[in-house]
Image (cartoon, rainbow, N blue to C red):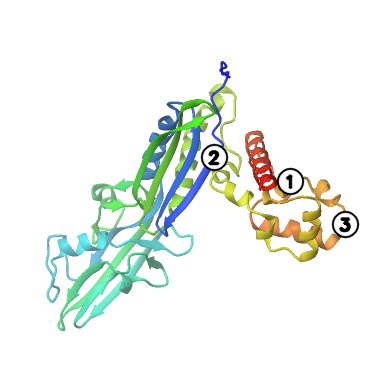
Amino acid sequence: MKKISTAAHMPTEIEVENISSNKAQIIAYPFEAGFAVTLAHPLRRLLLSSTVGFAPTAVKIDGVTHEFDSMRGMLEDVALFIINLKNIRFKIKGDDKRVEVNYSFGGTKEIYGSDLSNESVEVVTPENYLATINEDAELNFSLIVEKGIGYVPSETIRDLVDSDYIALDAFFTPVKKATYDIENVLVEDNPSFEKVIFTVETDGLISPIEAFKDSLEAMYTQMSVFNGVLDIDITPKEETTSSSVELNKLLQSVEELNLSARSFNCLDRAEIRFVGELALMSELELKNLKNLGKKSLEEINSVMEEIGFPVGFDFSDDTIDVLKKKIADLKSEENEG
């Protein structure tokens, strides 16, 4: 039946497909006509520009004074060495935002990314080639690796490092590819609703899902500038940026929690089938379940906290409505089956 809407349709479906360790698809629908591209385009730009990554920003090579120099005993000139170096992807271990690492190589050797991992940095492209040195060469160099976003030209970095370092163009973003497709989907008798399909590929510094979360966080943060003007709060609660991609976790069977037989049987008798049902319950509601003992209560609470959705989790009203509808649909499908 046709009707006049008073608010845009709220998308309810989210699917995440891990194609490989560094590539994933995030699918959401159904959007009102035009809404999919309105959200997808800025998210794509944020994926490519605001995702946090790591990059070498400066290098100091013993015996080398500038990037157009050459070094005795090394097959590559310094310019090619730097190009190869920028293609190697580093990740700082721990919480430091900037580290300086030192390397020393001698004798006949082909040097790859795998030779540069140490206690300070991890190399996620170990197969990438750096240089070849002969038996008379001794290659000693220091490298500064930093955490950042986007692209920073060497002209900017030159003012931030000592004069004996060669500044490098820094490509921080770990996202190699971010695209989206929009397809039409049928809602009731209306074929003009839309589905957006993101394809995200990273270089291994972070997972595609982490990159997508970073872009969502950046979008919410930028939008929050309007909070004071409009006297509203559009900053998401802690769970908002992750709830969309973790909805599948909430829709898993309680069997996936690997509870003891006593705890599981109690939930089964109460017809609690899905993890999301526990997250929606209050502590008192759970405690009042028939035959649920103290140990079972403690076990369920502990497991739910471990997965990030403790009993009585503070969901937004929209999320509660979506989650309840999805659980009801799944139970209906089970009963029909």
For the residues labelled 2 and 1, the Cα–Cα distance comes to 23 Å
For the point 76% across and 61% down, the residue is: 299
Question: 279 left or right of 176?
Answer: right
Per the model, the C-alpha gap separating discs 3 and 2 is 35 Å
The location of residue 130, given as percent across then percent down, is 23, 68
Mark 2, other Cα within 10 Å: few <14 / some 14–19 / many ≥20: some
As drawn, the label of residue 13 is 2
Quarter residue 303 falls in: bottom right
Of the residues shown, which amino acid type is indicated by label 2? Answer: Glu
Q: Residue furthest top?
A: 4
What crowding class fits label 1: few (fewer than 14 Cα within 10 Å), some (14-19), or many (20 or more)?
some
Res. 321 mark: none
Q: Which residue is mark 3?
A: 291
Give residue 236's position: percent from left, percent from top: 58, 37
Which tag, 3 or 1, sits closer to the chain's start?
A: 3
What kind of element bears circle 1? loop
Which three-letter amino acid code belongs to the residue tagged 3?
Asn
Return the residue nearer the eye: 128 or 282: 282
> Which amino acid type is marked by label 1?
Gly
Kind of element beneath mark 2: strand
Q: Nearer the viewer, mark 3 or mark 1?
A: 3
Q: Quadrant of residue 280?
A: top right
Which mark sits nearer the N-terminus, 3 or 2? 2
Which one is nearer the viewer's eye here, 135 or 127? 127
Q: Position of residue 266 (x, y in %)?
A: 81, 57
Say above or below: 229 vs 141: above
Q: Nearer the viewer, residue 323 or 3?
A: 3
Tell me, yes or no, whether the two marked residues, 2 and 1, touch with CB atoms within 8 Å: no
Q: How far from the left and from the top, in percent, is residue 281?
A: 76, 45
- Graded by Cα atoms within 10 Å as few (under 14), some (14 to 19) or many (20 or more), the crowding at tag 3 reads some
Residue annotated with mark 1: 312
Between circles 2 and 1, the one closer to the viewer is 2
